[in-house]
Image (cartoon, grey):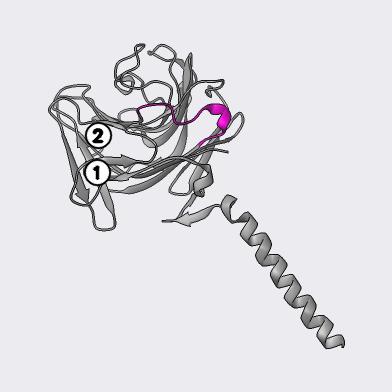
Amino acid sequence: MRRKLITFSLVLGALFAAAVASAEFSVRPTLIDGASWRHADRRTVACNPTSVTASGFTCTAQVPTCIAGGGGTVAASPQTNRQFTSYLTNAANLAVGGCNSSGGVTRPGYRPTKYQRVLTDTAITLRREWHGLTRNSWSDPDVTAPDAGIPVLTQAQGAVATPAINFDGIAWGFDTAVDASWMLCSADSTNESCTDSGVDVAVSTEYVLVLDYSVSGVLTGCVNGTCVSKTTNLPTGAINLSFQDTITTLDGTGRTLYLGAMEVTQQ
């Protein structure tokens, strides 16, 4: 009898654990390519390169605005390990290429997190890249191509007034003329500031960029698993944030942006 009771208890415990696991499955993070991604019940948009042969960026729930910058080129760019889409800007100073969502995909109060896979080009100088969630888009009447005018800052610069009207956002960015590292930046309609990740940008390298704004008042950013946080100049309130992944050429030469899979989740 004692043996039967022990066996029954073990079976009951196993069934209970399975039920709990099943109930929790939809809210547990899972691992995809080494990054922590949420399940579909928290996803607001997900995008991927269209295919290994077709150029473009295909998103769920959004029709993204993707440009190569007047006369530039959009192309499928299959690499050794995975597929990317490339955006080559035209050869004009401050030409912009990349993608942004056609409408807002989240708000600060929804506690969003953005995951983005990118590949750097064979050169990383004379260009500025931004990968984030921003209030403004290229069609915003307050500013045209905001990434042509929003600078990457050093951490030592502190808060600096943004050159665009009502510019809010959280982003990873780099401009090697300013700093060798990936910089975690944010803007609150008035000022922008950046925190140094300590991870130097390297050529021809894949990066998984995470922007985690799931805790009110704290932005945590991770570059290939190295994480830093900032609590200043964060966007707040009922403002719509769009995803934006862009490159700006800082001379008269076309520059190429490589975008891989992207996902935005919220609470």
Q: In which quadrant will I find the C terminus?
A: top right
Task: Indicate left or right for 89 with 181 as reference.
Answer: left
Task: Indicate left or right for 239 with 215 as reference.
Answer: left
Residue displayed at 21% across by 52% down: 52
The residue pinned by badge 1 equals 85
- Where residue 28 appears, as percent x and y from the top left, is 58, 53
Tell me the tag on residue 51.
Answer: none
Q: Amino acid at mark 2?
A: Thr
* Mark 1, secondary structure of its residue: strand
Quadrant of the rendered structure where residue 148 is?
top left
Q: In which quadrant will I find the N terminus?
A: bottom right
Q: Residues within 10 Å of mark 1 (few under 14, many from 20)?
A: many
210 or 193, nearer to the observer: 210
Magenta span includes 71:
no
Magenta span includes 105:
yes
Tell which tag, 2 or 1, sits nearer the viewer. Answer: 1
Q: Marks 2 and 1, Cα distance to the nearest angstrom?
A: 20 Å
- Where residue 121 appears, as percent x and y from the top left, is 24, 42
Tell me the tag on residue 125.
Answer: 2
Q: Is residue 30 above or below residue 128?
A: below
Residue displayed at 74% across by 71% down: 13
Q: From where the camera sits, is residue 116 visible?
A: no
- Where residue 202 appears, as percent x and y from the top left, is 31, 44
> Bounds of the magenta span?
102-112
- Mark 2 touches mark 1? (CB < 8 Å): no
- Where residue 125 appears, as percent x and y from the top left, is 24, 34
